[in-house]
Image (tube, helix red, strand yellow):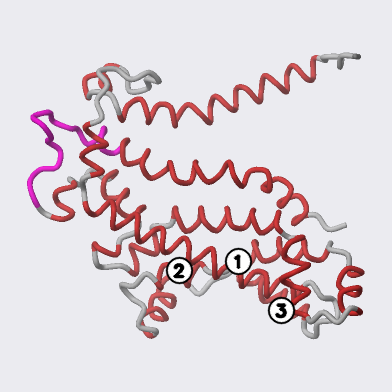
Amino acid sequence: MKLKKFSLFDGVNYTLVVLIGILMLYPFINVLAVSVSSYSAYIENPLRIWPKHVSLEAYVEILRHPVLWSSYRNTIIVTASGVLFGILLYILTAYSLSKRHLRGRTVFMLAIVFTMLFNGGLIPNYLLMRSLGLLDSLAALVLPMLMSGFNLILMKTFMENIPEELEEAARIDGASDPYILFRIVVPLSMPIIATLCLFTAVAYWNNFFNAIVYIRTVEKWPLMLFLREVIEGAKLASISGGDNAAESGGQQLTPVTLQYATLMLVTLPILCVYPFLQKYFVKGIMLGSVKG
């Protein structure tokens, strides 16, 4: 078996990849280490990667807070609704725009590109949500982000590369347009669909600005708004009332420990989902962004 010659260029590439990987992984390890360490250990070395005086009190305290669970519920509802309805709209719109014989196709594409450069602004969007009666509702977190011009163009470009001969053969066999779309085009488009599911889910999961603008009730907070309050140093007790949540079992929990523990709890769900979609990610992006 002939071994591949190892060149200096390969060595430099591998070294850079390892260094970038370490830089990307270090913040996560640091947050995890600090979240289970005592405050004295954090003061001793804020950049530590190995925990000291290990304690799970911060996680216990955060998990006992009711606002965390209501925020999780709201975020899961918003993210699942946004991904489900958003992907459905992407599929229907992109499939139509991928057909060159569609009348007004250029006008529609120009309108979509225009939305990528300009938007109505904060005040018009707020007035629109108010006129629709959607203020202080989860629908106000779903609808404004339901479609993205960038994601739509990715899916349209991907569908344009699907051979038209497949659809023509299906039509000869008597297949209708809905049948062709959902039984032929959609299965072939799974790489780009999985990629857009990841993009959309991360966007909804991380969004907190719309919640600041549209949501007034604590019970309707998404997870990122709860995290924002914790990171800004607000006491957990001040969110829902009660005694000081920074004290548990006679041990004082510092805001830093609570913040880092909350960061871990908020980040883990996305980290658990990503590996299952990773194999589609690169393929979907490459095929959806390059036409040929």
Q: Image quadrant for the N terminus? A: top right
Q: Residue drawn 75% across and 55% down?
A: 289
Position of 171 with respect to 54 (left or right) is: right
Residue situated in front as seen by the camera: 173 or 147 = 173
Question: Which amino acid does the dot numbered 3 rest on?
Answer: Phe
Report which quarter residue 246 is drawn in: top left
Question: Which amino acid does the dot numbered 2 rest on?
Answer: Val
Q: Tell me the distance, in whole angstroms, between the alpha carbons under discs 1 and 2.
A: 13 Å
Give the foreground label among 3 and 2. Answer: 2
* Residue 200 part of the magenta-drawn span: no
Give residue 49's position: percent from left, percent from top: 40, 20
Q: Which mark is residue 142?
A: 2
Contact check, label 1 and label 2, Cβ < 8 Å: no
Q: Which mark is residue 87?
A: 1
Give residue 258's position: percent from left, percent from top: 25, 37
Q: What stretch is highlighted in magenta?
A: 242-259
Residue situated in front as seen by the camera: 140 or 74 = 74
Position of 253 with respect to 257 (left or right) is: left
- For label 3, the residue is 108
